[in-house]
């Protein structure tokens, strides 16, 4: 897929692209006050949800089309570009009619192919030419995320970007939505030229997580950040725990360290060579381990023993995990590695059994 830049005229090429604004447009005063404060702190793209997908009825479901002229005022009075979420054909028609510059597809919507197709068709009909950003679907399904991108692409949209907002989880101990960083990283590997924007607000769900999540996104070379900011977060009508004032936003943005991607990697050549060699050794050792494991499989077959010996497996796990800890490696990392090795070992022994 060939994409066009999502950076609109006047927006710096320098990372990160910042999109900021309230979760929801609530009143004309709240929108204008927040927008002015953000514009004064150098923000160039203003976000505000006009239609809000709420988990349960009864919450604030967005001000609706009535709020679109407020965003037009923001454009006119601050010079910022404006962005909002669309979830239906009608949203697209209304947003385009009111000259919204950037549209995004929310996480609940990108999980639904019918809805994404409807939006893609509406974008084609209106010949919308601004950037369209696709949030990851609520469920950790990379193919579904890519599917949504493809639906837009097939509708002729070329200014596409993605927003990583984390994945739904029943366990909300730390994050509101689990980051599962490997999923956007794999997306970037599969479609390298697709701009990737981090959404620390919806991943973290709390103000104190915004700064570390911004930094992590920058360290992973994300192209931009979309951050919820409200002139009076404690009184926000939606997502108040995660919204920060424009002042705090600007403080956080000043603290973030953005590392230079254009730095030459020449000095790393030698170290990378070492990594290549070590990986080759690692693979050779793993292959050797599998061969031994197959011999064990042969023995088990001849002596009519079951493939899975849980006592032995428990011993291995416990012993290696504590060893790994002493060698400076994370225990949960070691557990994952051992589980993967064991799974492959079992697969190979079952193969022997069936021969
Ligand atoms: C939002 O950006 O306010 C929003 C509703 O996000 P998400 O689709 O990620 O839940
Ligand atoms: Mn929100």
Image (spheres, helix red, strand yellow):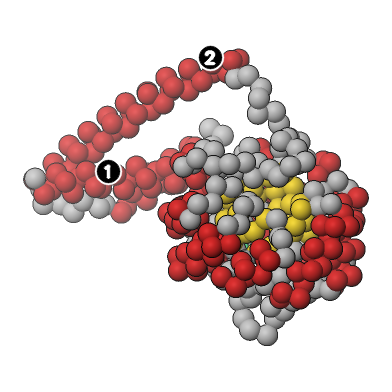
* Circle 2 crowding by C-alpha within 10 Å: few under 14, some 14–19, many from 20: few
SS at mark 2?
A: helix
The front one of 158 and 298 is 158
* Circle 1 crowding by C-alpha within 10 Å: few under 14, some 14–19, many from 20: many
Disc number placed over residue 76 in the picture, else none:
none
What's the residue at 73%, 35% (across, down)?
Answer: 14
Position of residue 166 measured from the top left corner of the image (x, y, whole percent) = 59, 57
Q: Which residue is mark 1?
A: 345
What's the residue at 88%, 48% (across, down)?
Answer: 41
Q: Please state the total of marks drawn on the protein image.
A: 2
Residue 101 visible, this orientation: yes
Relative horizontal placement of residue 249, taking residue 286 as reference (left or right): right
Q: Which residue is mark 2?
A: 270
What's the residue at 39%, 43% (across, down)?
Answer: 338
What is the distance, in whole Å, between disc 1 and disc 2 at their CAs? 34 Å
Which quadrant is home to the C terminus? top left
Relative horizontal placement of residue 208, taking residue 167 as reference (left or right): right
Residue at mark 2: C-beta within 8 A of ligand 1: no
User: Dividing the picture into quarters, in which one does residue 194 lie?
Assistant: top right
What's the residue at 66%, 22% (across, down)?
Answer: 263
The front one of 176 and 264 is 264
Q: Answer yes or no: do the residues labelled 1 and 2 have beta carbons within 8 Å?
A: no
User: Dividing the picture into quarters, in which one does residue 83 lie?
Assistant: bottom right
Position of residue 70 measured from the top left corner of the image (x, y, whole percent) = 81, 68
SS at mark 1?
A: helix
* Nearer to us: label 1 or label 2: 2
Residue 239 visible, this orientation: no
Q: N-terminal of the two: label 1 or label 2?
A: 2
Vertical arrangement, residue 118 with respect to residue 303, above or below: below
Vertical arrangement, residue 185 with respect to residue 108, above or below: above
Relative horizontal placement of residue 94, taking residue 325 as reference (left or right): right
Position of residue 80 measured from the top left corner of the image (x, y, whole percent) = 81, 52
């Amino acid at each position: 897929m060939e994409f066009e830049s999502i950076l609109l005229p006047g927006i710096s090429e320098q990372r990160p692209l910042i999109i900021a604004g309230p979760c929801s447009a609530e009143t004309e005063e709240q929108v204008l006050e927040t927008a002015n404060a953000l514009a004064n702190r150098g923000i160039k793209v203003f976000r505000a949800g006009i239609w809000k997908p709420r988990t349960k009825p009864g919450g604030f479901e967005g001000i609706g089309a009535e709020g679109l002229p407020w965003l037009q005022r923001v454009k006119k009075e601050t010079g910022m570009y404006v962005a909002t979420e669309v979830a239906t054909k009608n949203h697209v028609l209304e947003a385009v009619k009111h000259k919204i510059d950037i549209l995004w597809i929310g996480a609940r919507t990108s999980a639904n192919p019918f809805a994404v197709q409807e939006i893609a068709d509406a974008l084609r009909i209106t010949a919308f030419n601004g950037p369209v950003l696709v949030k990851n679907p609520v469920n950790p399904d990379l193919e579904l995320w890519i599917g949504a991108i493809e639906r837009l692409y097939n509708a002729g949209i070329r200014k596409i970007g993605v927003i990583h907002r984390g994945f739904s989880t029943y366990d909300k101990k730390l994050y509101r939505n689990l980051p599962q960083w490997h999923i956007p990283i794999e997306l970037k590997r599969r479609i390298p030229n697709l701009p990737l924007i981090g959404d620390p607000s919806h991943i973290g769900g709390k103000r104190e997580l915004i700064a570390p999540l911004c930094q992590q996104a920058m360290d992973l070379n994300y192209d931009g950040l979309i951050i919820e900011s409200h002139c009076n977060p404690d009184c926000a009508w939606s997502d108040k725990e995660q919204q920060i004032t424009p002042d705090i936003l600007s403080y956080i943005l000043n603290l973030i360290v953005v590392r230079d991607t254009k730095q030459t990697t020449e000095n790393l050549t030698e170290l990378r060579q070492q990594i290549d060699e070590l990986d080759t050794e690692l693979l050779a050792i793993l292959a050797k381990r599998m061969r031994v494991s197959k011999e064990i499989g042969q023995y088990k077959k001849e002596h009519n023993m079951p493939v899975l010996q849980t006592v032995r497996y428990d011993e291995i796990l416990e012993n290696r995990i504590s060893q790994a800890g002493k060698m400076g490696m994370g225990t949960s990392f070691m557990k994952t590695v051992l589980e993967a090795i064991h799974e492959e070992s079992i697969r190979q022994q079952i193969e022997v059994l069936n021969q």
